[in-house]
Amino acid sequence: MHFLHPGYLWFLSLMAIPVVIHLFNFRRYKVLQFSNFRFLQELQQESDQRNKIKHWLVLLARMLMIASLVLAFAQPFIPFTNQAAKSPSLISIYLDNSFSMRNTNNGVANFELARRKAIEIIKAQKEAAQIQVLSASCYGHEQRLLTKKQAIQYVEELAIVPASPKWNSILEKQKDIIELNKSDNAYCYYLSDFQEGERNFSSFVNDSTIHAIAIPFFANSKANIAIDSCWLEQPIQMQDQASKLLVRLHNYGEDAAENVRLSLTLNKEQKYVGSVNIAPKAIQIDTIPIAVHQSGYTTGVLHINDEPINFDNDYYFTLEVKSSFNVYCLSSNTNSTCFSALAAGFKNADFFFSDYNHINYNQMEQADVLILQDVSNINGGILATIEKRINGQSLSLVLFPADKNAEDLNSFLQAYGIGLGKKYSPVVLSPINAQNPFFKDMFRKIDESMEMPSVTSAYSLSATIQSGVNGDVLLNSKEETPLLIAAQKGSVEVFVFGFSLANESTNFSRKALFAPMMAKMMLASSDRKPLAYDLGSSRPIELPYNSKNAEEAYHLKSANIDVIPEQRIVGQSLFITLHNQLNKPGCYTLGDQSKAYELAFNYSRNESAPVEYTNVESWAKLLHASIIEADAANAGVVVNQMQEGIHYWQWLIILALLFVLAEVALLRFWR
C-alpha cells in the first residue's frame, strides 16, 4: 500500500477529538426535585448500560469517519509494480497494421480489434498526455508526439499496409523519442499478433524507467497457402523455346491442402490452369511448361485462391525473352571447325569469328559470350572490353590457353583468383560431379560409365580466395588438380580451362560433353536480374545502364502510377531505390526515352506465416513486458490501473459518509 499524499496522515491525530469529547462530557446537569424514584431504579440501571454501548458506538463511528476522510485525502493506492506509481511522462503505442493482422477472431479482423483497444488506451490518458503512435510502416513523421485528439485521429486513419518491420527497429524508434524527451516514466504498448522475427531487445529492456505492455491478438485459424516465388529452369528464356517455370508454394496450415487451383497468365492471356496438393506445413514445387513466341519483356502473374489471408495469392514476375544472343569467337585460326559445328546447332545464337590480328571491337562490345581460343595473353583492347562489362552488361568469357607459353595470362587471371602454372602430363580426368549446380539438370541421367575426354598435357590450375570473386572447380584430374575453374566478378563470369583445345592436346571438342557444357557456359551470360522484387525493400535494384542521356531521370510507371525513384549510375550499372513509393504489387515499366525495363513487385512474404507466440509469457519474458488480454472489457480501465495503480480514495469517501449516517442513526433511533 502506498499514499499519493502521505503528509495528510498526520491528521489522523484528529481522531483524539471525539475521544476527548466522550471522556470529558461537558454537559451540565439540571437538578430537579422528584418526590420518589423508587419505581425507577430498575429502569435507570438498564438505561445506563444501553447508553454506554450507544456512546461507544457513536465514538467508534466518529473516529472511523475522521480516519476515512484523512485516508481519502492521503489517496492510498496499490501500485501495479513495486515502484510507487506516478503519471506517465510519455506514452508510445505500436499498432501493428501489417498483412497478418487481417486474420480474424470471431469474424472480426485483428487489426480492427487492435485499433479499438488503441483508442481505449489513448482515451484513458490525461488531457496533457504526450503520445507517440507507431505503425508497421515506421514513417518518419511518427517520430513526434501527439495530443490525445491527434493520436485518436491518426489511429482511426491507419490502414493495412504491405510492411513488416523488425521488432528491434520499432523498439529503437521508441527508445529514441524517449531519450529525446528525457522521459523518466514512459509506457510502451504493443498491439500485435507478435509474429516471430528478429528479437534483439537487449538495448531496450534494461531501462527500468520504461514499462512495456503487450496486448496480443490471436486468430481463430492459422491456415494459409502462399506463392513464395518462381524461377526458370534455365537461366535464359529464348523466343519459341520450350521451357519450365518452377513455382514454390507453401502450406502454413496444419491440414493438407488438396486440389489448390493454380493459374498462369502471360501478357494478360491465361496460359495454364492446374491443381496441386500440398502436405501440412510443407513446401511444394510445381512445374509449369511455358513457351514465349515474342522477344522482349513478357509480364506474368501466378494466382491461387485462398482466404482470409489473400495478399500472397498473386505473384507477379517479368521475363526478358531474347530472340538471339551474340557469341564472339577469337582464335588463331578462323576456321575453327568445333565452334563452327557448335554455331550450326544453336538457332538462337549469332556467332562471329575472328583471329587475333583482325579483331572487330565494336562487335566484341556487343557480344554476350566471348570465347578466347589458343590465347597466350590478353591485349589492352580485349582487357578494356572485359573490365567495362564487370560493372555493366553481363558477359560470359570462355578461355582456352595456347598449347605453349600461356603463362602471361596470369596477369589477367589473378584478378579472378585463378593461377596458371606449369604444364604436366599424363592427365586423366575424373568423372563429372553430378551434384555440382553447373552440371545439375544438364543430363536427364548421368551414366557413370560416360567416357571422359582425353588430355595429353595440361596447365596446373589453382584457385585462391579473392575479394569480390566467387569461384568453383568444375573439372578435376584424378590427382585432384583443377582442369576447369569458373569464377565470377561483377557481371563477368569466366570459365578457364587448363588445356588447349588443339587436336593434339585433347579430343574434348569431339566428345558428347563438349556441346552441353559450352551451351551452359554461353547461357551464363544472361543478365541475372530477378524475376520479381519485394515491395517495401530498401535494397537497391541493379540494372545494366546504357542510356545516352545521363541527365534524364528514369520513371517507374503503370496505368495510374508515375514515380521517380532514387537513382545512381555507377559505371555501367543503374541502381534504383524505392522509398515506400509503391504500395501495390504488379508489373511496372522503368525507363527514360531511350531504354525501358519491365520490373515486377510483390508484397513481402514475411507476413505469410501465421506464426504467433502462443505462449504469451515467453514474449513477456523477452521484453520484460506485462500482458493485457485482448478480450479485456475496457483496456482503458486496465491501463489506468497499470499506470496509476489501484486507488481507493473514492471508497474511503463512501465509508466516511456511511459512518456519518451510522452516527446519525445511533443518536436518533437508539432510545
Image (cartoon, rainbow, N blue to C red):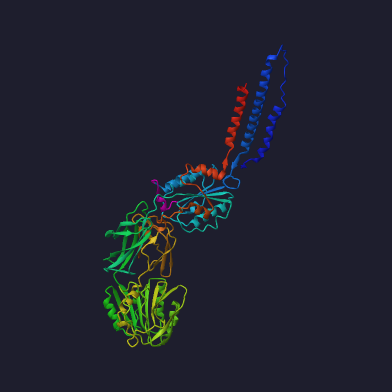
Task: Where is residue 248? Give x, y as percent.
Answer: 35, 62
Q: Which residues are magenta?
A: 96-107
Q: Quadrant of residue 540?
A: bottom left
Quarter of the figure with the C terminus: top right
Front residue of this view, candidates 160 and 205: 205
**Compared to 182, does 423 lie above or below?**
below
Q: Is residue 99 rendered magenta in the image?
A: yes
Task: Where is residue 220? Give x, y as percent.
Answer: 40, 49
Q: Is residue 283 visible?
A: yes
Which residue is at a point 28% across and 75% down the rendered structure image? Answer: 346
Q: Residue furthest top?
A: 35
Q: Is residue 6 rendered magenta in the image?
A: no
Task: Where is residue 576? Give x, y as percent.
Answer: 42, 63
Total marks in image: 0
Q: Quadrant of residue 228?
A: bottom left
Quarter of the figure with the N terminus: top right
**Compared to 326, does 603 lie above or below?**
above
**Compared to 633, does 19 lie above or below?**
above
Task: Where is residue 530? Give x, y as percent.
Answer: 37, 65
Q: Is residue 604 visible?
A: no
